Amino acid sequence: MKGVCNKVLKVDLSSGTCKPEKVPDKVYEYFLGGAGMAAYYMWKECPAGTTAFNPANRLTFASGPLNGAAQSGAGKWSAGAISPAFNLNSDSAATASFGIAMKQAGFDAVVCYGRADKPVYVVVDDGRAEIKDASEMWGTDAYQTEDAIHAAQGEDFEVVSIGQAGERLVRFANIQTRKKSFLGRCGLGAVMGSKNLKAVAVRGDNKFQVADPEGLKKLNKAINKRLLEMDNGKPEWLQIQKVGTAMATELFAPQGNLPIKNYSLAGWPEGVEAWHASNYYKKLKVTPWPCKHCVIQCHNKTHVKQGPYAYEGKGPEYESFAMMGFNTMCADVQAISYACELANLYSMDTISLGVIIAFAMEAYEKGLITKADTYGIDLTWGNNEGVVEFTKKIGLRADGIGYLLGEGTKLAAEALGRGATEFAVQMKGQEIAAHNWRAQYISALNYATGCAAGPNHERGNSQHIWVGHITLPEWGIDHVENDERWSWKNAGDRNAKFHDYCNVINSAGHCKFQEFRAYTLSDLTKTLNAIMGLDWTVQDLRECGERITTLQKMLNVRYGWQRGHDFQWPKRFFEPVSEGPAAGKIPIGLGDAIQEYYAVRGWDNDGVPTPELIKRLSMDEYAAGM
Amino acid sequence: MNVQIMCREHQFPPGTKFRAVVELIRQRLAEEPMIKAIKAKTGQDHIVFVLNGRIIREPAYDQTELQEGDDIRWVHPYFGG
């Protein structure tokens, strides 16, 4: 297959051995790479009965065919494993250059399994792999680890690493790369910790041949030019290079999409003002921090030079400040951004962390926990310092409530008892992301049915039909009326198409943010054809997405998913807010919508892929391992 | 004459200017809350139009005639999250 390395690196941490393995062409044709490749190795090697911290769990870091192309957004890559949060198949994506460097090192993926008997890191240097002692790095944060590896191996290595939260098995631990991008969701950092794997470093000079170099060059030029010109003439607060995803504050507020006070309020004017893009820009003094080849440049770097929260580093993205700021009612932009960066150092997902701190605040308000439990920290809503301090307690797994909260909202609520599960905003063990289901019911459907990331926004993204006005015109979603956000009209079909769309993007190695900027499914299809030598239509691309989603669902069945898991909704889903654009809106009919979604997908009433679907997708051999 | 707007076929008489598409989309999105919010703040909706893969802006709306088979897209001003 053109455009890829046609092999992966298998790393057996138990025996301390590494070996390359050839990948058949059919795997790329069926699953592309990235999220699809991670799912494929789960299917191939990880048996039923495996749980997240079992050595048999496969942690696969996987690039996509687009990684390495000089096209905006072509730096995204994925990792997958059984999630410690919900013990089902999961994946998560990051940017920066690790995926590209992995291919340059000669491998499309690095598949890690087993458990090392002491802390280690893996070095892949131009086709040669070695497992090295990481004992001296154990106990350091994720950025210090990257620095140590750069010092030992060379600055030109791309590194993924975990901090203390990953080592100590916080169930929402993340994995960082280049101090700016994160495999945020699903707790994959804790899987690394469970394997005594502190980091992986890759570099190389491998040149992978694309099928049509000239065609790809022309495509890249036209697409990059179009994306680059999108923001011309817009005010600064609508220019992505200026503020990153902070522009969401002003635009989400009129839709009722923000998560406020553990998802119990509809509006918070003080917060909207504080977290407005112009204030974000002013308080954090951010500058663009682009990924390789990206012209959109949504990542930014802070330059806070003075004060208790001085730091230069990752500027929080929407999901981070929404959950750590809005959801806790904290309006000090510098303090909460600093707390987000602390989470990055310790390696924690800021979405889950924001939910669980808000959960703790509500428990504190209700008297379920007191200062005697919270190390004397005041957990009143809006206490910025409290959020900073609790980030440390959870990240370092301090004895007591800090340790308990590191188990995630579901387990913490069950342990606290006394009605705490009533306000635990989670599904299947993972915290809900920062798009409010009251603003568009399809968010609830997306959270309930996600196959690879639990209740995540980003692996379905169907909320963006309204929230961000992403459409999939090639697949029949060209325009949706605003008031349909509170109906279930075509919701199953739309949700299915968005799940498949996310899967092809996450498997191809592309960034979904380009789609907010006129990158189309036709662009992606042409690019894949030019790289891989395929002759796909946009409908072939859809079928590929269907295959990946179906494989993920079959994996979940293998690991114990049952229909009832999709129906265990947070009680808060059905608690209306009293004011604002989403006042009174609750997703009544969600159960029927889930059943419709199953039917649209070709799954049976229990949500399991039918023999007819498996035959249509030519996936019989995969179904045998369900 | 057929053109594709977001991959859906639309018919226009020969000689129609691109402005007709702009007005059609603006009318369709006029009540969309995010567009309303942006327009209230900036005086413009900031919707971007793409004709056959290239961005088209004023004053080209009145200078460009639609052609059979044109591929037209519009892009919402909002980004990300």
Image (cartoon, coloured by chain):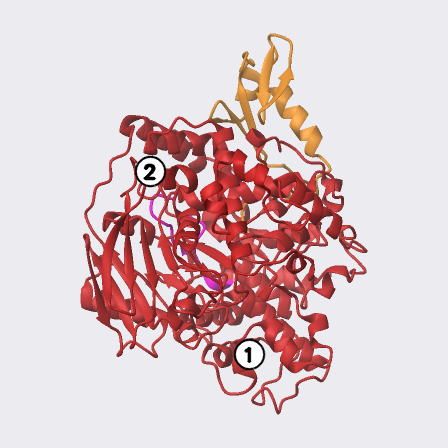
Question: Which residue is label 2 attached to?
Answer: A25
Q: Tell me which chain the residue with mark 1 is part of.
A: A
Reply above or below: A191 against A553: below
Give the color of chain A as drawn. Answer: red
Which chain: orange?
B
| Residue type indicated by callout 2 | Asp
Total tally of numbered discs in the picture: 2
Q: How far is disc 2 from disc 1 in space, using C-alphas?
A: 53 Å
Q: Give residue A274's mark.
A: none
Looking at this view, name the residue that lies furthest to the bottom. A372
Reply above or below: A431 against A135: above
Sequence-first tag of 2 and 1: 2
Magenta stretch, residue numbers: A283-299
In percent of width and height, residue A238 lies at: 54, 46
Number of residues whose C-alpha sits closer than 10 Å to that of mark 2, classed few (under 14), some (14–19) or many (20 or more)? few
Question: Which residue is label 1 attached to?
Answer: A385
Residue displayed at 33% across by 33% down: A531
Query: Going by the image, does A261 lie left or right of A184?
Result: right
